[in-house]
Amino acid sequence: MADFTETLTEKHIAMIERQPVFFVATAAPDARINLSPKGYDAFRVLAPDRVAWLDLAGSGNETNAHLLADGRITIMLCNFERPALILRIYGRGKPVLPADDGWNELSQHFTLFPGTRQIFDIAVESVQTSCGWGVPFMEYERERYTLLKAHSNVDEEKWVGKRQAHPGSIDGLPTSKTDRYIEGTMPAPEK
């Protein structure tokens, strides 16, 4: 049975802090629904009614485009250990880029990684938990550092140029353009 709350509780926050992966879903009128898995130490609970995550440049920028067009977002976390639990955060979000007001306040909550593109700032509207009894047990092994390695030791001007030249979302929606490369820190390479 699903339970709803208006904000995150201490129990929700404790569950979120233990998860190595989360999923993000967004949509915009007349566009595909985007659903993406996210890893790294990139998710933060800023308050019971506010969360954020650090976004790295990757294959596209659908979340940015959808939030600019519509604003709605759902974040899902699954507890792959005991107790079984699925937690969904429903809210409205906005991208905050390094040149934007609010970047300095938000970025202080994260360790910046190479290739950091933006931070998504989410106002929580409601939280749903459900049993998760159909979700398998899974064991976390380690992070995959391939994306971070790809962003390390790059030419800053070329990196920014590539991000600014991206035509938008896969459905042609406009995206905010990154104006600078974030060096960040590089974790130990995967073996």
Image (cartoon, rainbow, N blue to C red):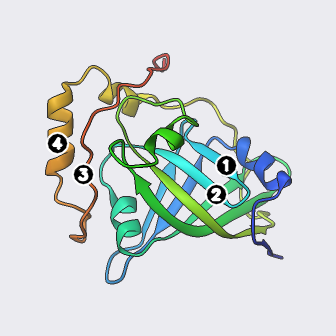
Structural distance between the alpha carbons of marks 4 and 1:
31 Å
Structural distance between the alpha carbons of marks 2 and 1:
6 Å
State yes or no: discs 2 and 1 in contact (Cβ < 8 Å): yes
Relative image position of residue 7 (x, y in whole percent): 75, 65
Point out the image quarter for the N terminus: bottom right
Structural distance between the alpha carbons of marks 4 and 3:
10 Å
Q: Local crowd at mark 1 within 10 Å, few (<14), some, or many (≥20)? A: some
Structural distance between the alpha carbons of marks 4 and 2:
31 Å
Residue with the mark numbered 1: 45
Residue with the mark numbered 3: 177
At 54% across and 34% down in the image, what residue appears?
108
Mark 3 / mark 2, whichever is N-terminal: 2
Structural distance between the alpha carbons of marks 3 and 2:
24 Å
SS type, badge 3: loop
Disc marking residue 162: 4
Front one among 68 and 168? 68
Mark 4 / mark 3, whichever is N-terminal: 4
Disc marking residue 50: 2
Relative image position of residue 144 (x, y in whole percent): 48, 31
Q: Local crowd at mark 2 within 10 Å, few (<14), some, or many (≥20)? A: some
Mark 4 / mark 2, whichever is N-terminal: 2
